[in-house]
Image: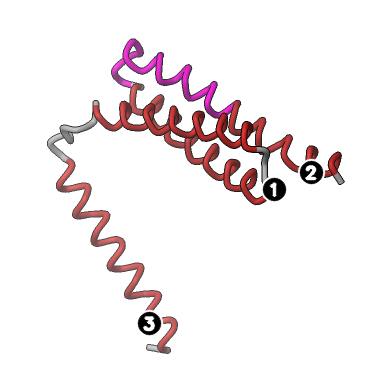
Amino acid sequence: AAAAEARALAAPVALVERCRAHAQLLDEFSPICNPNIVSDAKVGVHLLAGAARAAFQTVLVNSPPDDLKARLEADIAALDAMETRALGAAAAPPPFAPDVRACVAASLVAVVAFALGRTTGR
C-alpha cells in the first residue's frame, strides 16, 4: 500500500515542483525581456501557477506526509508571489482596455442569451 501511495504522489509532486521552477525562470526573465513579449512571460507564470495548484489539489487527495505538504505549500506561496508581481506591472491598463472590456462583456451577454434560448426552447 505504501508503494502505491508513493506512486500516486510522485507525478503531481513533480508537477508542482517543475511548475514552480519554470515559473521562477519566467519571473526572473520578465523584468529584462523585450517589452513586446513581456505579457507572454507573465501569462506563462499564471498558467504554470494554475497547473501547480491543480497538481497540489491531487497531492492533497492522496494524504501527503506533513513535511511534503508544507514544502509544496511553500511552492504554492512562491507562485502566488510571482503572480502578484506579474499583475503589479500591469496595473495601468492600456488605453484601449475599456473597449476590450466592452467587447468581452457584449460577447458574454450574447453567449448567455444563446444558452438561455437553447435551454428554454426559444
Q: Quick one: label 3 or label 2, which is nearer the N terminus?
A: 2
1 or 2: tag closer to the N-terminus? 2
Q: Inspect the image, locate mark 1, and give the three-letter code of the amino acid beneath it.
A: Asn
Return the mark for residue 117.
3
Front residue (pair 6, 82)? 6
Height in image: 16 above or below 100? above
Residue placed under numbered mark 2 in the picture: 5
Looking at numbered disc 3 in the image, what kind of residue is underneath it?
Gly
Rendered image quadrant of residue 31 = top left
Asked if the residue at tag 3 contacts the one at tag 1, i.e. Cβ–Cβ closer than 8 Å, the answer is no
Q: Is residue 114 magenta?
A: no
Counting from the top left corner in percent of width and height, residue 77 is at 44, 32
Between 51 and 97, the residue placed more toward the observer is 51
Circle 1 sits in a helix, a strand or a loop, which is it? loop
Identify whether 110 is placed above or below 89: below
Task: Classify 10 Å Cα crowding around label 3: few (below 14), some (14-19), many (20 and above).
Answer: few
Please identify the quarter of the rendering in which residue 72 is found.
Answer: top right
Q: Position of residue 119 (x, y in %)?
A: 44, 83
Q: Position of residue 15 (x, y in %)?
A: 63, 33
Q: Main secondary structure of the magenta part?
A: helix
Residue at mark 1: 62
Residue segment shown in magenta: 18-36
| Cα–Cα gap, marks 3 and 2 | 47 Å
